[in-house]
Image: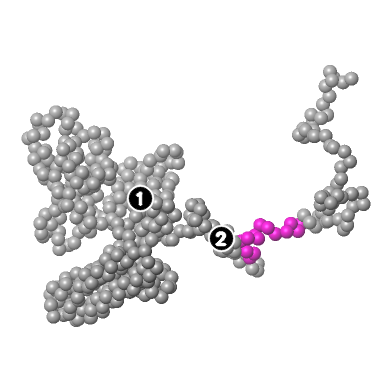
Amino acid sequence: MLRLSGGQVESLWDDVLPAEVRVLPEDLAALDELLSDPALLAPIAASWQSESLAHGRPTISMQTYVRLMVIKHRTGWGYETLMREVSDSLHLRRFCLIGLGERVPDESTVRKLTRRLGASVVNEITRVVIDKARREKRFRPRAARIDSTVVEADVRYPTDSGLAWDSARVLAREARKLLVKVGKDAGRIRDRSRAISRRVRAMTRTLGRRTGERKQQVLELTEQAGKLMQRSIREAKRLVVVARRRARGRGAQAKLRQIQKLEAIIERSERVAEQIRKRMRGEKITNRLISIFDPDARPIRKGKLGKPNEFGFVTQICEVTENTKTGARGLIVPTRRRRARQPDRGHTAARHGRGAPATRDPTAGGRARRRLQRRAERRGAGAVRSRADVHRGPPTARLAANPATPGPLPDRQRRSDQPPQTRVRAAPQQAQGPPGNASLDRMVDPHLQP
């Protein structure tokens, strides 16, 4: 059951406290005034499932949860440290609307609630805060600072055998959940995770050997793990066909949701199997899957010597301010996350002395070339010259005005080390000063005349 607001915070114990303890500091008082708006909790109520709004065990107060997460973001504490510090501080207790006689929520409760709400609810709350600032504080954004950074995903270092082990284990687990809903006689998926884990341990022992055949042995063990995973995939597909026939009547929506989860794991497992097949054939693997649980994470090679490979996302951060002065503070709009693209490896390799930088095709399309093409299309011109020679054409107008001499000049003498048409000087020339103003040359000082 969703509980947006809590009970009474004030108690008899508050009258015993000194007056300065009952008053919040300036920064917490400003945040308390901002977070007291009930409209901030509207995104949470909208995202909550309708069947859980008035049934089940009541949640903690959403006002308390939002204030706890604000303190966590400001201080950078973990969940356990956050609960411990709030429990020991009178100011933080009053800010989080937790009475002196109440218990602070457990850290697992706050963590599970954060996982349930997700990042979309946080983005909606941020938009509500921005709209409130524009409406009440007359905040008008006139400048924006935009930057992109890489956020590392919470995944372990991916290997083909490790992905096969995860796929077999998750397929068996989701199949067991589906069998509870559709019946035990719908099918069976064997849990082959132990068989694959034996291959993984054998692979580790093989890599420890200093023999020339260890690479071939690792490939053979990886291929065996892939074949075991494909058996689980075929069994899961047969179970999905039978489960869809039985997804009728009471509880049909719950059955369909579980079927969709199993189908998603099947699709990711098939991608892992395809990656293993390409590796066996020696083909290039594009759009590599590095995690069964986080399919959007991508490998990123930034060229760091200590950590050359990272796995995560590219996040774009934008801050809007009222002016462009140095140090101007504003509001950070909800972040946008997209899949990371593979950067240019040549420049990072050359930076650390690992090879020559990658050469770029001068005729490749770019913003300037597209602009020239559009300009040529408007003027009805023909083909546009390549980007390499756009500004390197011959100066035809200057050459026509100053034509070259047909032959060597008669009064020129050349030595073997002099190029053609170089005037030979008879004597050393005196150094000339910088040219002055013409009006100053005409001025004559009577004191300097002879």
Region rendered in magenta: 384-397
Percent across and percent down for residue 447 are 84, 18
In the rendered structure, does residue 390 fall within the stretch colored magenta?
Answer: yes
Number of other residues with Cα within 10 Å of mark 1, as a class: few under 14, some 14 to 19, many 20 or more: some
Percent across and percent down for residue 72 are 25, 45
Quadrant assignment, res 261: bottom left
Amino acid at dot 2: Thr
Seen as rendered, the residue at the extreme top is: 447
The answer to whether 292 is drawn above or below residue 136 in the figure is: below
In the rendered structure, does residue 118 fall within the stretch colored magenta?
Answer: no
Quadrant assignment, res 248: bottom left
Seen as rendered, the residue at the extreme left is: 12
* Residue under the point 17% across and 62% down: 50
Compare residues 223 and 256 and report the one nearer the observer: 223
* Residue under the point 88% across and 57% down: 407
Separation of disc 1 and disc 2 at Cα?
38 Å
Identify the element where label 1 is drawn.
Answer: loop
* Residue under the point 30% across and 47% down: 129
Amino acid at dot 1: Val
Quarter of the image that includes the N terminus:
bottom left
Mark identifier at residue 359: 2
**Residue corresponding to mark 1:** 333
Left of 275 or right of it: where is 112? left
Q: Earlier in the sequence, mark 1 or mark 2?
A: 1
Percent across and percent down for residue 8 are 11, 42
Identify the element where label 2 is drawn.
Answer: loop
